[in-house]
Image (cartoon, rainbow, N blue to C red):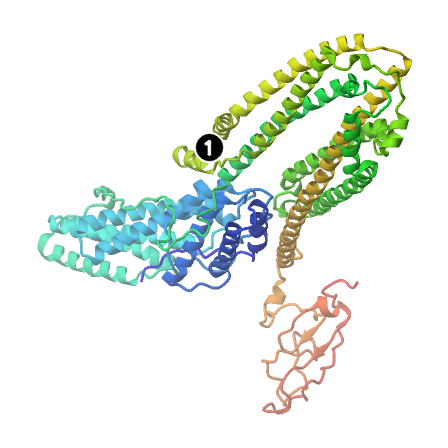
C-alpha cells in the first residue's frame, strides 16, 4: 500500500460561543421572534462546534461531513458577526498541528493549503502558528499536489493504460516531489519523517517512469535503451532501499524492475546484442501534469444549511447603523430649527410683554395669559419638580462616571499584567499586545468621557438659567390673589379698548399662534417618518460586492424628508414676517399707551412672569431630557463594561493557557548545556592492564556480577591493590559527595553462590596506598 503524508488535525481550546454571540444578538435585535430565532441558531452553532472539535473524529466520511458543515457555517456566519472587533470578545486558540504525532495515515487536497496561504492568513490579527505560516502551507500545498499526481500514476497503472502515458505521469510526479523536497529542506518545524519520505517518493516515481519508458523502448525494438533505463531504475530503488526503507515499501517495485532487467539482459545477450547506452545519453521522458491546486468553493458540504440565513451580513448591519445615524442627524437638525424658532418667538413676545399688554388695559387685574401660564406651571409640578430633577442629576452623573472608570480600570490592570509578562518572557510572549487590542475600546471610552464632560457643562447652563428665573417661577406658583398683589397696579388705559392698533396686534398674535401650532404638527410628522434600507443595501451588496452607503442613504433621505424640509423653511419664513409686523404694530401701541412709572413697573413684572413661564417649560424639558440621557447612557455604559469584562476574561484565559505552555516548555529545557561524559563512567569493562587505577568515590557491585569464588584469597586483587573487588564500578559524586565512600554488595545472598558473602553486607573499604594520588582533588 502506498504511503501518503497527511497533516494531523489542529487542536484547539474550548470556546463558548453561546454567551458572546447571544449578547450581541440581544443588543442588536429587539425582543421578538426574530431575536429568538437567532438565539436558537447560536445554540445550534455551539453544538456544531463541539461536535466538530470537541471529540475525537474517526476516519470516516461522516466525520469529514461534520468538519465541512462547521467550516461552511463559519464562512456563512463570519460576515454577519463582528468577529475581528473587540465587540464579541472571542478568542480562538489553535495549537501547532506538528507539535505531536506523525504525518502519516491519510490524505489532503492541495487547494486547502493554498486557500490558507492566500486568504486565511491575511485575516489573522496575530502571528500564525508555524504549521500555517506562509512558507509551511506553501510547502504542504506542493506535497499534496505531488501526492495527487501520484494517485493518477497508481490509477493509470491499475487501469493498464499505455506505458508511455504512465511514464509521463510518473515523471511529472517525480518532478513535483523533487520541488517539495527542496522546499522542505529549510523547514525545521515539519516532522522528521517528511523529508525522507519525499526523497524516497522522488526516486520511486523516477524509477517508475524509467520502468514504463523501458517498456516503450522494448516496443520500439530499442533493447539497449530498455536495459539502460532498467539499470537506472535499479540504482534508484537501491538508493531508496538503503536509505529510506523504514519509511516506504520498495520491495514490490524493486522486484518488478529486477525481473524486467533480468529478462531484458537475457534476451539482449542471446538474441539482439544491442549496445547499451549511457543514462546521460537517453532521451528525456516527457511529463504530463493532471493536477493543480483548485480553489476552495463554499459550501463544501452538500448538506449545508445556513443557521443564520435570515440575518443580514455585518456589512449591511454597519451600513444600516450609519444610515440610522444620518437619519437621526437630519431629524434633529429639522426639529432643532423648529424649536429654536419657537424659543425666538417666545422671547420676542416676552420682551414686548405680549399678549399680556393687550389684556392689561385695566391696570389692576392679572392678565388672562399670565393666569394661564401660572396654572400651567402649577400643573407641571412647580418649583419642587425642577428642584428634584436638578438634585438627581449629580447622582446620575456620578453613577455613570463610576461605571466608566471601573471599565477602563479593568483594561488598565490587564494591560499592565500583559506588559509585565511580555517584559519577562520577551519573544516567547507571542500574543497580540493588550495595548493594541484595546485601542477601539479606549477610543470608545474616551468618547464617553467627552460626552459626560459636555453633559456637565450643559447641566451648569440649566442651573444658571434656573437661578435667574426661580424667583418669578415661584411667583407663578402662588394663588391668583397673591399673584395679583405681587404685580404693581397702574392707571387704567381704557381709552385703548377697541382701538385699531389693539385689534391688529391681536390678529397678528393669533397668526403667530397658528404658525406655532403648525410647527408642532410638523415636528411630529418629521419624527414619525420610518423606512428600511435593508433591501437596498442587500441589493447593492449582491450586485456590486460593496455598499455605497452615503449615496444610497442621501438619496433616500432626500426622498423621504424633502417635502418636510421645504415646509420647515416656509414655516420659519412666515414667522419672521409676522414677528416683524408685530414689532411694528407694538411700537404704535406703545406710543398710544399712556406711559408712567407705575405702568412701566407693572409691565416689567409682567414681562418677567411671561419669561419665567417660558424658561420653566424649557428648563423642565431640558432636565427631563438630561435625566433620560443619563439613564440611557447608564445602559450603554453597562454594555461597555460587560464588553470590557468579557474581553479581559478572555485575555486572562488566554494568558493562563500561554503561561501553562511556557512553564511546560521551560520545564522541558535542559538546565545546563550538554557535556561529555568521562570515558570511565561509560565503560563498564575492566580497565586495561597498565598503571594503577585510583579508587572511585562511590562504588556499587553489579547485580549481574557473580561474587568471588570460595577458594583462594577472601577478596581478589584488583589492579595490584589487595582487597578490591574485580567488578564494574560507578562514580556518583552528585549523590554522595567526594568524601563519602560506600561499597555495597547487591547480589542475591548465598543462593547458588558457594562461599559468597551474605546479601547486603558491605565490603571493607581498602586503604589506598600512600603514593596514590586521589582521582579528584579533595574539596
Q: Position of residue 20 (x, y in %)?
A: 58, 51
Place residue 256 in its image quadrant. bottom left
Local SS, label 1 = loop
**Can I make out residue 239 in this image?**
yes
**Position above or below: 3 against 485:** below
State left or right for residue 128 relative to residue 575. Answer: left
**Can I make out residue 188 in this image?**
no
Q: Nearer the viewer, residue 450 or 236?
A: 450
Q: Position of residue 56 (x, y in %)?
A: 47, 64
The C terminus lies in which quarter of the figure? bottom right
Q: Nearer the viewer, residue 418 or 388?
A: 388
Residue linked to disc 1:
547
**Position above or below: 76 against 243:** above
Q: Nearer the viewer, residue 346 or 129?
A: 346
Place residue 427 in its image quadrant. top right
Dot 1 alpha-carbon crowd within 10 angstroms: few under 14, some 14 to 19, many 20 or more: some
Q: Position of residue 477 (x, y in %)?
A: 84, 34
Residue sitting at 56 percent across and 47 percent down? 30
State left or right for residue 176 relative to residue 776. Answer: left
Q: Position of residue 667 (x, y in %)?
A: 65, 59
Q: Nearer the viewer, residue 615 or 774?
A: 615
Amino acid at each position: 500500500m502506498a504511503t501518503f503524508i497527511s497533516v494531523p488535525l489542529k487542536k484547539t481550546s474550548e470556546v463558548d460561543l453561546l454567551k458572546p454571540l447571544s449578547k450581541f444578538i440581544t443588543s442588536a435585535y429587539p425582543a421578538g421572534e426574530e431575536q429568538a430565532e437567532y438565539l436558537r441558531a447560536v445554540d445550534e452553532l455551539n453544538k456544531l462546534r463541539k461536535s466538530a472539535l470537541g471529540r475525537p473524529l474517526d476516519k470516516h466520511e461522516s466525520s469529514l461531513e461534520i468538519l465541512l458543515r462547521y467550516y461552511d457555517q463559519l464562512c456563512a456566519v463570519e460576515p454577519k458577526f463582528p468577529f475581528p472587533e473587540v465587540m464579541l470578545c472571542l478568542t480562538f486558540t489553535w495549537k501547532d498541528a506538528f507539535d505531536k504525532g506523525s504525518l502519516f495515515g491519510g490524505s489532503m487536497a492541495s487547494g486547502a493549503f493554498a486557500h490558507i496561504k492566500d486568504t486565511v492568513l491575511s485575516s489573522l490579527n496575530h502571528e500564525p502558528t508555524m504549521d500555517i505560516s506562509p512558507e509551511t502551507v506553501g510547502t504542504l500545498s506542493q506535497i499534496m499536489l505531488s501526492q495527487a499526481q501520484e494517485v493518477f500514476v497508481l490509477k493509470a497503472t491499475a487501469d493498464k493504460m499505455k506505458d508511455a502515458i504512465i511514464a509521463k505521469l510518473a515523471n511529472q510526479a517525480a518532478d513535483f516531489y523533487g520541488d517539495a523536497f527542496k522546499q522542505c529542506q529549510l523547514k525545521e518545524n515539519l516532522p522528521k519523517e517528511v523529508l525522507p519520505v519525499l526523497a524516497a517518493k522522488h526516486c520511486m516515481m523516477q524509477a517508475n517512469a524509467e520502468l514504463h519508458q523501458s517498456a516503450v523502448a522494448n516496443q520500439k525494438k530499442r533493447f539497449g535503451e530498455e536495459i539502460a533505463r532498467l539499470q537506472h531504475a535499479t540504482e534508484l530503488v537501491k538508493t531508496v532501499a538503503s536509505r529510506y526503507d523504514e519509511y516506504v515499501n520498495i520491495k514490490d517495485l524493486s522486484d518488478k524492475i529486477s525481473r524486467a532487467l533480468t529478462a531484458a539482459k537475457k534476451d539482449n545477450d542471446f538474441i539482439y546484442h544491442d549496445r547499451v547506452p549511457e543514462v546521460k545519453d537517453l532521451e528525456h521522458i516527457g511529463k504530463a501534469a493532471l493536477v493543480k491546486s483548485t480553489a476552495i468553493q463554499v459550501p463544501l458540504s452538500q448538506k449545508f444549511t445556513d443557521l443564520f440565513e435570515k440575518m443580514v451580513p455585518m456589512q449591511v448591519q454597519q451600513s444600516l447603523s450609519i444610515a440610522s445615524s444620518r437619519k437621526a442627524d437630519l431629524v434633529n437638525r429639522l426639529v432643532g430649527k423648529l424649536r429654536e424658532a419657537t424659543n425666538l418667538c417666545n422671547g420676542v413676545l416676552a420682551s414686548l410683554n405680549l399678549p399680556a399688554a393687550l389684556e392689561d388695559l385695566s391696570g389692576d387685574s392679572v392678565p388672562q395669559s399670565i393666569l394661564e401660564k401660572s396654572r400651567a406651571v402649577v400643573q407641571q409640578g412647580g418649583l419642587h419638580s425642577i428642584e428634584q430633577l436638578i438634585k438627581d442629576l449629580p447622582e446620575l452623573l456620578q453613577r455613570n462616571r463610576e461605571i466608566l472608570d471601573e471599565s477602563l480600570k479593568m483594561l488598565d490592570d490587564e494591560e499592565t499584567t500583559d506588559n509585565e509578562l511580555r517584559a519577562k518572557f520577551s519573544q516567547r510572549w507571542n500574543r497580540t499586545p493588550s495595548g493594541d487590542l484595546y485601542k477601539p475600546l479606549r477610543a470608545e471610552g474616551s468618547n464617553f468621557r467627552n460626552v459626560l464632560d459636555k453633559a456637565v457643562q450643559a447641566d451648569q447652563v440649566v442651573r444658571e438659567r434656573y437661578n435667574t428665573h426661580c424667583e418669578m417661577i415661584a411667583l407663578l406658583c402662588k394663588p391668583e390673589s397673591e399673584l395679583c398683589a405681587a404685580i404693581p397696579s397702574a392707571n387704567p388705559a381704557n381709552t385703548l379698548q377697541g382701538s385699531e392698533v389693539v385689534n391688529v396686534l391681536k390678529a397678528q398674535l393669533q397668526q403667530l399662534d397658528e404658525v406655532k401650532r403648525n410647527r408642532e404638527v410638523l415636528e411630529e410628522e418629521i419624527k414619525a417618518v420610518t423606512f428600511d434600507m435593508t433591501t437596498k443595501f442587500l441589493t447593492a451588496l449582491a450586485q456590486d460586492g460593496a455598499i455605497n452607503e452615503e449615496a444610497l442613504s442621501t438619496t433616500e433621505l432626500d426622498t423621504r424628508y424633502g417635502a418636510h424640509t421645504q415646509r420647515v423653511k416656509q414655516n420659519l419664513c412666515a414667522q419672521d414676517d409676522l414677528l416683524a409686523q408685530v414689532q411694528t404694530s407694538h411700537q404704535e401701541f406703545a406710543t398710544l399707551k399712556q406711559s408712567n412709572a407705575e405702568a412701566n413697573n407693572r409691565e416689567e413684572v409682567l414681562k418677567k412672569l411671561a419669561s419665567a413661564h417660558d424658561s420653566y417649560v424649557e428648563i423642565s424639558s431640558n432636565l427631563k431630557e438630561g435625566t433620560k440621557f443619563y439613564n440611557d447612557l447608564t445602559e450603554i455604559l453597562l454594555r461597555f463594561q460587560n464588553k470590557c469584562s468579557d474581553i479581559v476574561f478572555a485575555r486572562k484565559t488566554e494568558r493562563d493557557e500561554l503561561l501553562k505552555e511556557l512553564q511546560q516548555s521551560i520545564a522541558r529545557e535542559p538546565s545546563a548545556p550538554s557535556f561529555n561524559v568521562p570515558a570511565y563512567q561509560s565503560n563498564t569493562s575492566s580497565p586495561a592492564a597498565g598503571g594503577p587505577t585510583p579508587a572511585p568515590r562511590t562504588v556499587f557491585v553489579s547485580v549481574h556480577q557473580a561474587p568471588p569464588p570460595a577458594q583462594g584469597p577472601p577478596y581478589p586483587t584488583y589492579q595490584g591493590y589487595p582487597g578490591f573487588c574485580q567488578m564494574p564500578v560507578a562514580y556518583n559524586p552528585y549523590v554522595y559527595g567526594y568524601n563519602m565512600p560506600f561499597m555495597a554488595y547487591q547480589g542475591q545472598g548465598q543462593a547458588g553462590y558457594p562461599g559468597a558473602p551474605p546479601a547486603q553486607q558491605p565490603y571493607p573499604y581498602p586503604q589506598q596506598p600512600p603514593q596514590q594520588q586521589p582521582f579528584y582533588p579533595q574539596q
